[in-house]
Structure formats: C-alpha cells, structure tokens
Amino acid sequence: MGMIILDIFAFLAAIGILVAVHEWGHYVAARLAGVKVLRFSIGFGRPLWIRRGGPDQTEYRLSSIPLGGYVKLLDEREGEVPEQDLHRAFNRQPVRQRIGILVAGPAMNFVFAVFAYWLMFVIGVPGLKPIVGEVEPQSIASDAGLEYKDRIVGIGEHTVATWEGAVLAIIDTMLDNKRIRMELATDSGRSKIIDLNIEGRVKELTEPGMLFSGLGFAPWVPSIDPVMGEISPGGAAEAADLRSGDRIVAAADTEFTSWLEWVQFVQAHPNETVDLAIERNGRPQQLPLTIGQAQNEDGATIGRIGAGPDIPENFNEQYSGDQRYGPWDAVGVAVDKTWSMSVLTIRMVARMVTGEVSVKNISGPINIAQYAGYSIMIGLASFLNFLAVVSLSLGILNLLPIPILDGGQAVYQLCEAIKGRPLSTRAQLIGQQLGIVFLVLVMSFAFYNDLTRVFS
C-alpha cells in the first residue's frame, strides 16, 4: 500500500509540474502577443481551487482530473467578444503569432527538459561502468566474441561511460543498422572491436525488458559484502531495527556472501516475514524482518526493504562512471542530452509506426506512475531524468499534426495562411473527431500494455 501511495504521489507531482510548464508556455506567449487569457487550469473537470488575478482578472484553477490542463484564450469562435476586446481575441491575431502561441507549450517542455538535465548533471548522475557480466553460450553476444569482464568503451559513434549511456547507444545504433559495433577494453587491458548481428531481431530486442536477454549478456555487478549502509526512513529495514554496519548472515535458511545475493533474496520475497541472522559489532543477533514491496522499471512486483550497501572506499574509482559537471559546463551537456533524447524518441516513434520497433514500449498512466515512484525512490537525479524524458515525450506528442493537439492546430493556421481564409467549421470538426478517435485508440493500447505488465 505504501508503494502505491508513493507511485500516486510521484505521478501527480510529475504530471502537475509538466502540465504547469506546458500551459505556462502557452500563457506567456499569449500575454506577449497581447491576447487576453481567460483561464489557466491545471487538470480538467470540477474545480478544486479558483483564484482570479491580474489586470484581466484571469481565472487560475486546480481541477479534479489531474491528467492535463489548458489555457482558455479570448476567441470569437467560442462566444461573443466585447467590441473593445476584439483586437485581443486569438482568432484576430496574425497567423505567425497564433502558431507561436500554439507551439510555445511544447517548446517550454523542451526548455524544461534542458533545465532538468542541467540540474541532474550538476547534482551528479550515479552509474556503474559498462562492464560485461555473464555471456550466454550460442547467443548474439557470444557469437560476436563478447566476453566476461569486457568493458564497453564505445558503441557505434557513441562514447559511453555508464550502463545507462550504453543502453541508449545500443538502441540508437540498432534502429538503423543490422549490426551493433562495440569498442571494448578487455580485462587484460587490450582493445578489440566486435559486431553484434541483430538482423531481423530489432522488434524483439525493443520489447520491454528484452534487450540484454535477447543479446545474450548481462551487466556485471561488482561483489560487495552484505553489510548495511544507509537506512531509508520509513522502510522495512528501519522498522526491523536494522542499522548501518549490520552484516547480513542468513535468512530463511539461505546464507549470503555478497550484497547481490541479499538483494536477489529480498526481491524474490515481497510481503514476507523472515527470521534474519545478522552480526552487529561482531555479535550474532536474530531479528524478524517483514519485507516490503515495490514495482521495478518493468512493472513487476519485487521485495524492498529501504536500505543500501556499505560501499568500499575505492568502489567509485574502480567501478563508478558517475557524471558530474560544473554549472557552466552542464549547460552544454544538458542541451546535447535533450537533443539526442529528442531525436531518439522521434526515431522510436517512427519505427513503431512502420512496425520495426515493438509497440509494447507505449506506456500509459499506470506504468508512468510506477516508474515515477521507482525513480523518486532511487534519488533526485533519477527523478529529474524521469521528468526530462516525460517532458520531451509530451513536447513531441503535442507537436504531432493531430487536430486535437497543438501541432494539429498549428496546421490549421498554416492552411489558413495558404488559402487566405480559415478552414470550414465542418472540416475542423471532422479533424477534431478524427484526432479524438486516434488519441482514444492510443490511450486504450497504452492501458492494455500497462495491464499486461502488471498481470504478467
């Protein structure tokens, strides 16, 4: 129950932030163009809070359905406009200004993504170096010559320092190629280049959770002793009176020699109570531990206790690929990250349309809420990364030429500029209906994917 509440809180916080950012873009652009703003709403439906302010007595409201928002502008097509305000009506503005107001919302999503990535890189992005773990025999990886403890240095045209960067580079490379070229540094220190043959396998490999198993290798995880480090407030570990420095010896007749073994045990036993054998200050003790639950990034239920390992002093130097920059240097890195993620998102969507990439990647609110909760548990940098990715997705989605979205409305304005007069009301109505049908179909499919992940 606690995890569900966290998921809902993280989801509402994320959607609230991103919708406010998007609608603020429309609001500011309209004000700069001299258009009268009647209402600024976060959410739809029955208002929960209303306030009026400013020279135009704009209505600001929070509404009961937190799945979007809108800015209502003065417009003759939506009601009678007083003669003294005609020059401030949206429909009376030049086409270029109307388009500017429409695209300002998505544009603000891109600006926010740059800010989120900037803050993330200033704080520091934790990550493990991309070192290869177990390689499955007779797999794509083994056939290409990938070996245990190889460190990935580059993929295609990308230089990589962490597993997150490596995964994004693999996906980006395989969208246009039949082979994934990897530059590696072996455990003995020599360099080598291999090609992973993925011809005919892209759709399979882009299904959620299938990348590593499909390629036939796993990330290497360094061995860390099963000693408790940081204890999260309110978690199962704190409730059981576990403390930093406690060594986990055994639970339910299972002995542990590494932190990974302990994590795998916890994840496999959500909501179970176990008798835990520990060593505290060299003395053996027994504690009852009720393991909590969480959803991982694929939506599966796993056990969680809210604790991290005691990290050795030389761990970061040997295994960490953390990315951290000064405030000025982080600007350029954030802009590059926003650009590359935007391009990758567009390419993924295009390949879904052509059937080359699995449409199971489309996520609805259930999966987004689970990932929001998962990311906020990991830390601020992870949550910022989540916000940036979703903000980019919202920006790109709203720029699609679908009539009910900002991009479709901008297309209407362009048609008016070309024809010299607005499209007929009938044509606009048909476009709106088609747009609604398209969005309902997409959302229905997204819900189907969400439910499949939850119950699979």
Image (cartoon, rainbow, N blue to C red):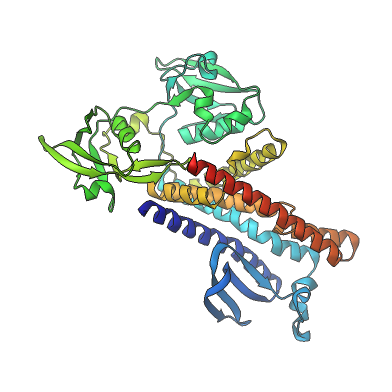
**In the visual, does 122 lie left or right of 247?**
right
Placement of 128 over or under 398, stated as above or below: above
Placement of 89 over or under 277, stated as above or below: below
Placement of 39 over or under 238, stated as above or below: below
Q: Nearer the viewer, residue 324 or 231?
A: 231
Q: Nearer the viewer, residue 342 or 404?
A: 404
Percent of width and height locating residue 24:
59, 65
Q: How many marks?
A: 0
Is residue 68 at all visible to an observer of this figure? yes
**In the visual, does 37 lie left or right of 431?**
left
Q: Quadrant of residue 60?
A: bottom right
Q: Nearer the viewer, residue 173 or 404?
A: 404
Q: Measuring 56% from the left and 50% from the top, which residue is drawn there?
A: 364
Q: Quadrant of residue 344?
A: top right
**In the visual, does 356 lie left or right of 227?**
right
Q: Measuring 41% from the left and 34% from the top, which residue is drawn there?
A: 321
**In the visual, does 347 lie left or right of 61?**
right
Is residue 174 at all visible to an observer of this figure? no
Q: Nearer the viewer, residue 297 or 123?
A: 297
Placement of 52 over or under 429, stated as above or below: below
Q: Measuring 17% from the left and 35% from the top, which residue is drawn there?
A: 277
The N terminus is located in which quarter? bottom left
Q: Measuring 51% from the left and 14% from the top, which residue is drawn there?
A: 138
Percent of width and height locating residue 290:
26, 45
Percent of width and height locating residue 165:
50, 35
Percent of width and height locating residue 286:
14, 39
Q: Residue furthest left?
A: 283
